[in-house]
Image (cartoon, helix red, strand yellow):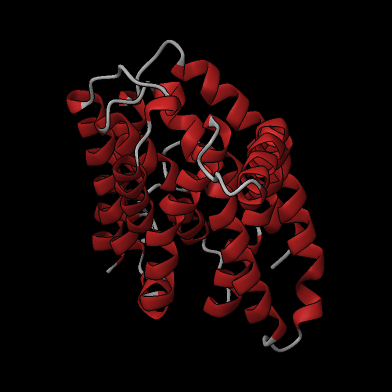
Amino acid sequence: MTLLQAFVLGIVQGATDFLPISSSGHLVLVPWLLGWRFDPRVAFVFDVLVQLGTLAAVIAFFWRDLVSLVRAALAGLVQRRPLATAEARLAWLIAVATVPAALAGVLFKDAVERAFASPATVSAFLLITAALLYAGERLGRPRRDLRSLTVTDALWIGLAQALALLPGVSRSGATMAGGLGRGLHRREAARFSFLMSVPVFLGAGLAATRDLAATPHALTLAPPLAVGFVTAAIVGYLAIRWLLAYLARRPLTPFAVYCLLVGVAGLLMSGFRG
């Protein structure tokens, strides 16, 4: 992998990880369309490790919220009143929402890795993202904020996040659609989606780091990984800022249309290329 390729994929990761159009899907389709061929194991490790760049973007953007949540959760434990405040309660609900994806990642890791090798499969899963976004907008009745979030809501959104392990199913799109389905306002659904990405990205990054250590000639990947990390962090920060402003006034429908068009185009090109 060259530095230019890492830079391009870092832009793709940073933009598409937070915009609800599937970073994993684009990280498969963009190299495929450009004719870039990487060792599948190396490509998978790069894709996951570059998510640490978008993790850095989330932490940079929401650092005040994250500090408040961690402090509240720890204070609640010390006082033996873990749900005493709204911040502590939200912190534990984020933990609850993380469980489904963590379990699915352990149980279906090999199957998920195999799915990354098929552009046709990724394109088909993009159609699922389109359907989730459309359904969230059509069926959701935005009326709630995060203060009213329940354990059932958190598990529901967590299940949506587990579905997003499949390349082509957008994590942010699935979780935001799940939040809309539970009656959250768009910005509130997006905020919860971004906050709950922190433990998921951190866990996936640690697992990928272990895989990287077992990869032959791992040190040769350090320069492209660094380029991808920094690029994804910068672009990801800008994407979060833009999307939150966008969702204050506009729906997710245009992203559903985009995923539909890209998914159909990918399936047609897969059939044409054989």
Residue 205, percent from left and from top: 63, 64
Residue 175, how many percent across, how many down?
38, 42
Q: Is residue 36 left or right of residue 64?
A: left
Count the labels in the image.
Answer: 0
- 213 up-or-down from 268: above or below: below
Quarter placement of the C terminus: bottom left
Give the image location of residue 208, x and y in percent. Answer: 62, 72
- Is residue 96 visible from the viewing direction of this image? yes
- Image point 62% across, 59% down: which residue? 202
Left or right, 103 with respect to 53, comes to: left
What x and y, as percent, mark residue 247? 45, 19
Q: Quadrant of the N terminus?
A: bottom right
Closer to us: 190 or 41: 190
Dividing the picture into quarters, in which one does residue 136 lie? top left
Horizontal arrangement in the rendering, residue 98 relative to residue 150 (left or right)? right
Can the viewer see residue 17 in this picture? Answer: no
**Residue appearing at x 44%, y 26% in the figure:** 147
Residue 159 lies, with reference to residue 208, above or below; the image says above
Name the foreground residue: 80 vs 73.
Answer: 80
Q: Quadrant of residue 201?
A: bottom right
Could you tell whether 245 is left or right of 99 in the image? right
- Residue in the image at 30% along x and 16% along y: 143
Q: What residue sits 76% from the left and 86% below the top? A: 217
Q: Quick one: 171 or 187, which is closer to the camera?
A: 187
**Residue with the most extreme left position:** 139
